[in-house]
Image: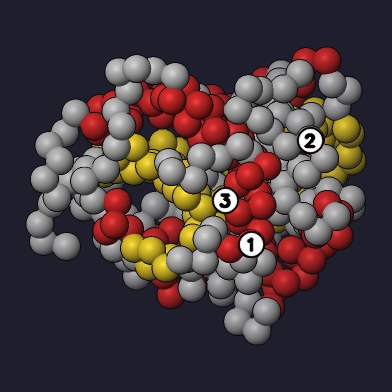
Amino acid sequence: MKRFPWLRSVFLAAALALGGVGCTPAAPATAGGGSAAEETPREYSVRGVVRRVEPERRSVVVKHEEIPGFMPAMTMPFDVKEPKELNGLKPGDRIAFRMLVTTNDGWIDRIHVVGSDTNAVATPSPVRITSSVPLLEAGSLLPDYTLTNELGRVIRLSEFRGQVLAFTFIFTRCPYPDFCPRMTDLFARAQKSLAGQPDAPKNVKFLSISFDPEHDTPELLRAYAERHNYNPSHWTLATGAWDQLEPLTGHFGLLFGRDVPPEKMEHNLRTVVVRPSGKIQAILPSNEWQSEDLIREIRAAAAEPTTPAQGQ
């Protein structure tokens, strides 16, 4: 990877840990859900530095070290089951904790402060890494970008005009169940649910955009999609060159890019619903929503006029 050298080592570590294939290839998330309640969680011992504490979300953002056998080092939020786990935590605390992972869930506990990083600075939310493009919001017109889909065909976002478009961002080697696997599972659930609703809008398209273009080739995207029971008539997976991905992700405050070092990369999430007119209906942040929320926004977007917006 000539243009993004740090990510090669990051993703190589993840690929070796996961067998070089998709997110949880032995037991992928499915549209029908799993039996996580009966599943014995896998346990990992982790160390890292607190970047931000979000007690209202029962979450803490941690710049964590590599988790051997599971995930490379990066910065990301972790949920807790018990709010008291966050008591007394502050940015700069060096912590040790247990991470528990099932097929469809992940959380941490047994958090202990083991030191302090005096050079650590609290990470505000959100942080923008790509600042050359404006942040978009509901009502904004979605700019046009060029991607390549799982069939190897070049597509443009403008091709979805006249339809409701729901898109999110993933990479197929993402292992943590609350992140890319959950976004993919929610899309699969929404696709299946809409197919069973006689009054559902018919002009709906789902689009999963990978920000790992060097690895996520059309062939791998298609294999990943098929493992998640996608319907190619309604769901597209795609990626693109960095000159397209960086501004597209930057419009939604996503925190990665070809020149972003690991210590500044925060794996955050955005899912966007676009009206047939090309204007944004809603931006669903993080992973704190369900397929029913997505379907509600899709229905609201479908109720808008279908005349494409002008001024692109």
Amino acid bearing label 3: Ile
User: Can you give x and y, in whole percent of width and height, for residue 51 in the image?
Assistant: 63, 48
Above or below, 188 against 116 in this view is above
Rendered residue at 63%/62% (across/down): 219
CB-based contact (under 8 Å), mark 3 and mark 1: no
Which quarter shows the C terminus?
bottom left
User: Can you give x and y, in whole percent of width and height, for residue 5 in the image?
Assistant: 69, 78
Amino acid bearing label 1: Glu
Disc 3 or 2, which lies upstream in sequence? Answer: 2
Amino acid bearing label 2: Ala
Disc 3 or 1, which lies upstream in sequence? Answer: 3
User: Could you tell whether 302 is left or right of 20 in the image?
Assistant: left
- The residue singled out by tag 3 in the image is 170
Q: Secondary structure at mark 2?
A: loop
Rendered residue at 42%/68% (across/down): 154
Q: Secondary structure at mark 1?
A: helix
Disc 2 or 1, which lies upstream in sequence? Answer: 2
